[in-house]
Image: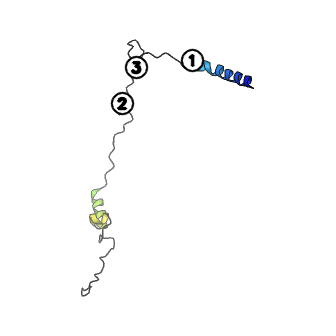
Amino acid sequence: MQLKLAVLCCACAAFWLPPAWAQQSVLAGPADPQAKVPAPAYVSAFTGYQPLRDDALAPWREINDEVARAGGHLGMFGGAHAGHGVKPAPSTKPGVAK
């Protein structure tokens, strides 16, 4: 049994050793002036940039009329008493005419 295990381990080592040996390469030292260096590649920061496009302008008179129908600028934001049919709450104080 031990012999079979030893043969199996040697076979696995023999199988994996050549690819591992082929992957080893001698790297040039960083201070070696003769070392081959890949050419620098320039990539602009504006690659793929799309300029901002202005939206089509709406007629200002129609926009002003829409704001007026909503009850003014406060009505556009849903403020109280702003032309949406919201009426002020009646006073609950005694002696105040309704």
Q: Which residue is mark 1?
A: 22
Q: Is residue 51 left or right of residue 36?
A: left
Residue farthest along the top direction in this orientation: 34
User: Which secondary structure, mark 3?
Assistant: loop
Residue 10's x, y, as percent? 67, 20
Q: Residue at the spot x=31%, y=54% of the render?
A: 58
In whole angstroms, how far apart are the C-alphas of marks 3 and 2?
16 Å
- Which quadrant, please, contains the C terminus? bottom left
Residue 17's x, y, as percent? 61, 19
Q: Which residue is mark 3?
A: 39
- Which quadrant, please, contains the N terminus? top right
In the foreground, 85 or 91: 91
Position of 34 relative to 58 (above/below): above
Local crowd size for mark 3, using a 10 Å CA cut-off: few (<14), some (14–19), many (≥20): few
Residue 24's x, y, as percent? 53, 18
Residue 33's x, y, as percent? 38, 13
**Of label 3 and label 2, which has the lower sequence position?**
3
Q: Tag 1: residue type?
A: Ala
Q: Tag 2: residue type?
A: Ser
User: Which secondary structure, mark 1?
Assistant: helix
Q: Residue at the spot x=73%, y=25% of the render?
A: 2
Q: Which residue is mark 2?
A: 44
In whole angstroms, how far apart are the C-alphas of marks 3 and 1?
26 Å
The answer to whether mark 3 and mark 1 are in CB contact below 8 A is: no
Image quadrant assignment for residue 87: bottom left
